[in-house]
Image: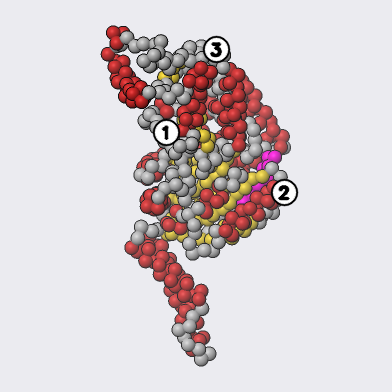
Amino acid sequence: MGFRKRNAKRSDNRSSAKVIMGKPASQLSKEEKKILSARMAEIRSENGGKNTVQNTIPFLCMYQDGVCQVSENFFSLTVQFYDANYSISEFDEQNNIFSKYCDVINLFDNTIKFQLTFENQNRSKAKLVKTVQIPEQDDDFNSIRKEYSEMLTDKLLKGSNGQSARKFLTFGIESTSYKAARAKLMSIKNDVIKGFKAFGVEAELLDGRQRLEALYYALNPYRNSPFLFDWDEMLRAGMDTKDFICPPSLKFNKADFEIGNAYGAVWGMNILAGELPDEILKDFLEMQNLFCVNIHVDPLDQIDALKFVKKKLTNVEQMKIDEQKKASQSGYDPDILPPAIKMYIEDIEKLLGDLNSKNERLFHISISLRAYAKSKKELKLLSEMLKRTCQKNNCIMFPYDYRQEQTLVSTLPLGYNEIPVRREMHTSGIAIFVPFTTKELFQDGQATYYGINTLSGNMIRANRSRLKNPNGLILGTPGAGKSFSVKREILDCFLTTVDDIIICDPEGEYFPLVSALHGQLIRIASNSEQHINPMDIAIDDYMFLILLAIVLVPVLENK
């Protein structure tokens, strides 16, 4: 049995670009230009005509290739990396992912500062909803398409698809010129992407527009308007890249700030525990709020790191000697030491051994947490939630009073760091903030709905013809929903494509579905009215008949 659908009519609307004499042509539409003009007018009115908001954003120039000149002699580049199946992997595979992630961190020497940014950003829900809408076709099933689109939209908005957990690795170097910085940054970028690919994680370099888009969503948490930017439009209007990404207004208070129509705050985090669980980052990002976990890392030279640790060990040993002297003078046993000193000595000796014999490096790090909310009351609730999560992982959260402006811009993926608090940590300590949970499968364009990811809550959409292996096999226990999954995929394919669907169904399970979709039923049996004439079969069709015989002959023999 099977059914064929007529090809849908398609229109190819192509717009020709207008060339303005003496000025570059803009790629923005009239509607997008209108939105952009309104946004610029809003920013100017909020700032009283002064670029105070733009001046807060700490970079000098963003180049089209993605290189950002943060200061006079500091340049940075950003790589976005994606997820891996860490949470559902076996213990040995988790260790392999962790080890390879440590190798990526160890790529950076003391001349390269880097920044890890893990951020929940709002995505354009209107654009997402548009991806799951099914266009009408010239048949009798548009009412079903409408109902199916409503179901997909409901599933999409109920999940966490409205937000995007983005992962950035930003690294920067000191250089005297853009040309010299670009050559070295691109070389580092190749090593970073190769390091991620070594354990199956996709990574890509963000060009200038993509970096500006990430900054736009980081600085405009609840704006409904999408990011609009065009290099030619910027040149035509005499604008700066900061004009396209800055929020309408900024007001900094003692322990929080107002950003546009939203409220936000930045906190620091101190680690009290000797060991952390590998799910600490997952605990923050799975809250489905606009949270950002930011880690600035300043690598130490290995020789300087060893000197630093040895000096610390010498200081603690001196404390031990002082305590023993006090104990002897007081008539106590000098071998009885305070527990803290014993713990410090053990930890420093272990760290010294790791630096000497294992693949460990030492870094200065600064950890900060940023949150956005629609009201001050909601922001306070979010801060309490963050405190509980920190306490759960034996950490402590503290506010950055009167430093909200410096810490806010330090959480942007630029490589700029004005966070005053830092501590020393080795490679494994940084890597314990494992940013991997499970891979997402949400393909844009024409794709089939396959359900909800149980770990992330996101919708699964895929076009199997675009995968490496388009074949599929559905397995499961009796009653688990195998037939339902097949029927849903058949219906999805019927409503969204113009493909031919052929079903080989010895049990007759799919007869009602094919009939409801006005398909053609062909019944092959000894008492059937349909017959196969072997003389009408082409050579290419024999393989199909052989497969059909393998399926049907046992069924006919049983009957």
Q: Residue at x 49, y 75 (%)?
A: 341
Look at 57% across and 14% down and name the residue there: 140
User: Mark 3 highlights which residue?
Assistant: 138
Most extreme residue toward the bottom, as rendered?
331
Does 536 sit above or below residue 261?
above
Height in image: 454 above or below 140?
Answer: below
Q: Is residue 247 left or right of residue 443?
A: right
Splitting the image into 4 quarters, where does residue 126 fall?
top right
Q: Secondary structure at mark 2?
A: helix
Residue that sits furthest to the front in the current view: 559
> Which kind of residue does numbered mark 2 sit on?
Lys
The range drawn in magenta is 259-268
Magenta-span inclusion, residue 267: yes
Query: In whole angstroms, how far apart are the C-alphas of marks 1 and 2?
Result: 48 Å
**Residue under circle 1?**
474
Front residue of 313 and 402: 313
Q: Which residue is mark 2?
A: 377
Q: Is residue 35 left or right of residue 495?
A: right
